[in-house]
Amino acid sequence: MTRIRLTYRALDDLDTIYNGSLEKWGEKVADEYLSHIEESLKLLAESPLLLKTNDNVSNRFKVYPASRHFLICDTLGNDIYVLTIQHMSADLINTLQDMAPTLEEEANVLHERLRRSR
């Protein structure tokens, strides 16, 4: 079975999503957002081929919708690494371009660590 791993950035995104939702819409909505993301992660673990490259967004990273968010991922071996989680209202193309240098570096570090651990 495919393992899903979240980077520190993705974990921070989850905190931001929860706390922002809690402040704007309350605990019920904040819990629902996290629940939808968790269900999407479980679905990807069971069916990793659902994760697709979208050349309109990124030719490097894979994207998967999770309710009102996008999971931006990279795959290493049988593992899926969630690099960041972005709201669908964001201009995803520009957001990823702004993040690209550091997001690319994070992915390269993950690849190197995996290569060394084998």
Image: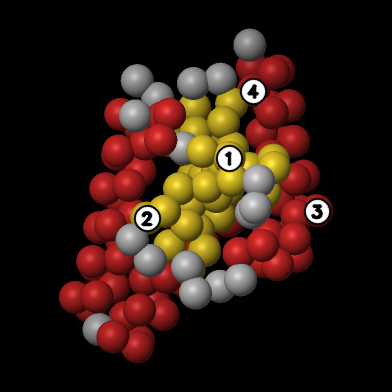
Q: Amino acid at mark 3?
A: Pro
Extreme-front residue of the structure:
56
Residue 59 against residue 117 in the figure, above or below: below
Residue 65, placed above or below residue 28: above
Q: Is residue 104 left or right of residue 50?
A: right
Q: Toward the viewer: 83 or 7? A: 83
Mark with earlier residue (3, 1): 1
Q: Residue at x 52, y 47 (%)?
A: 63
Return the residue at label 2.
Answer: 66
Q: Earlier in the sequence, mark 1 or mark 2?
A: 1
Colour theme? secondary structure
Q: Which residue, given by chain and number where applicable, does mark 4 sit on?
A: 114
The amino acid beneath tag 2 is Ala
Q: Residue furthest top?
A: 118
**Amino acid type, residue under disc 4 in the picture:** Leu
Q: Quadrant of residue 111?
A: top right
**Image quadrant where one finds the C terminus:** top right
- Name the residue carrying label 1: 53
Closer to the eye: label 2 or 3: 2
Q: Which residue is mark 3?
A: 101
Dot in front, 1 or 4 = 1
Q: How much space separates mark 3 and mark 1, taking CA atoms?
A: 18 Å
Residues at badges 2 and 4 in contact (C-beta under 8 Å)?
Answer: no
Whether residue 17 is situated above or below residue 57 in the rendered picture: below
Q: How many residues crowd mark 4 within 10 Å: few (<14), some (14–19), many (20+)?
A: few
Residue at image location 71% in from the left, 18% down from the top = 116
| Label 2 or label 3, whichever comes before in sequence order | 2
Asked if one can make out residue 106 in the rendered structure from this viewpoint, the answer is no
